[in-house]
Image (spheres, rainbow, N blue to C red):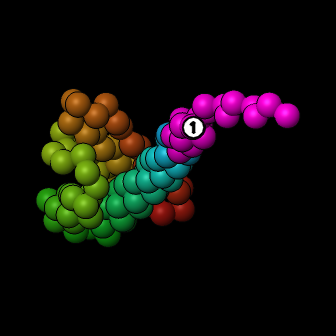
């Protein structure tokens, strides 16, 4: 019986594991990004809603604006370009983040709270 030569496929499993690990890391990172962006949107809408309630209660708009900005400072987008809390009866708030992140969020009070 003649001994069979050993196959040299050492490292094949390491390459496969590296590819699978890279795909898994990408998938998990994408999932966390989607979850974080969803949380940030809900947090922003909640802050704007509270700001609208503040304005509707008759408090100074500057105080309400400051309160909203303080709640939003924990989100990573930094400087806010514009924040408008409506007190004109429409019960509408608009937040625009600076130019590098083109994000605008609108929030409207329900009809019974206007």
**Is residue 98 visible in the rendered structure shown here?**
yes
**Is residue 83 visible in the rendered structure shown here?**
no
Q: Residue at x 54, y 62 (%)?
A: 112
Q: Which residues are magenta?
A: 1-21
* Residue named by callout 1: 10
Whole-percent x, y for residue 71 in the image: 26, 64
**Secondary structure found at label 1:** loop
50 vs 27: above or below: below
Q: Please state which of residues 57 and 48 is positioned toward the viewer in this rendering.
A: 48
Quadrant of image for the N terminus? top right
Q: Residue at x 24, y 46 (%)?
A: 77
Whole-percent x, y for residue 110 in the image: 52, 57
Whole-percent x, y for residue 94 in the image: 33, 43
Quadrant of image for the C terminus? bottom left
Quadrant hosting residue 14: top right
Q: Residue at x 31, y 49 (%)?
A: 86
Q: Residue at x 48, y 63 (%)?
A: 113
Asked if the stretch drawn in magenta spans residue 19, the answer is yes
Whole-percent x, y for residue 60 in the image: 17, 64
What is the count of numbered marks? Answer: 1
Q: Please state which of residues 28 and 11 is positioned toward the viewer in this rendering.
A: 11
Tell which residue pokes out farthest to the front in this image. 1
Image-based side of 42 in relation to 6, left or right: left
Q: Please state which of residues 112 and 103 is positioned toward the viewer in this rendering.
A: 103
Asked if the stretch drawn in magenta spans residue 62, the answer is no
Quadrant hosting residue 55: bottom left
Tell which residue pokes out farthest to the right in this image. 1
């Amino acid at each position: 019986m003649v001994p069979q030569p050993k196959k040299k496929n050492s490292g094949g499993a390491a390459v496969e594991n590296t590819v699978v690990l890279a795909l898994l890391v990408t998938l998990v990172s994408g999932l966390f990004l989607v979850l974080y962006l969803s949380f940030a949107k809900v947090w922003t809408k909640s802050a704007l809603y509270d700001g609208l309630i503040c304005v509707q209660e008759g408090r100074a708009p500057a105080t309400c604006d400051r309160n909203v900005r303080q709640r939003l400072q924990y989100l990573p987008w930094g400087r806010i370009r514009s924040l408008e809390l409506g007190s004109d009866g429409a019960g509408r708030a608009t937040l625009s983040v600076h130019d590098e992140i083109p994000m605008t969020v609108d929030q409207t009070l329900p009809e019974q709270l206007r």
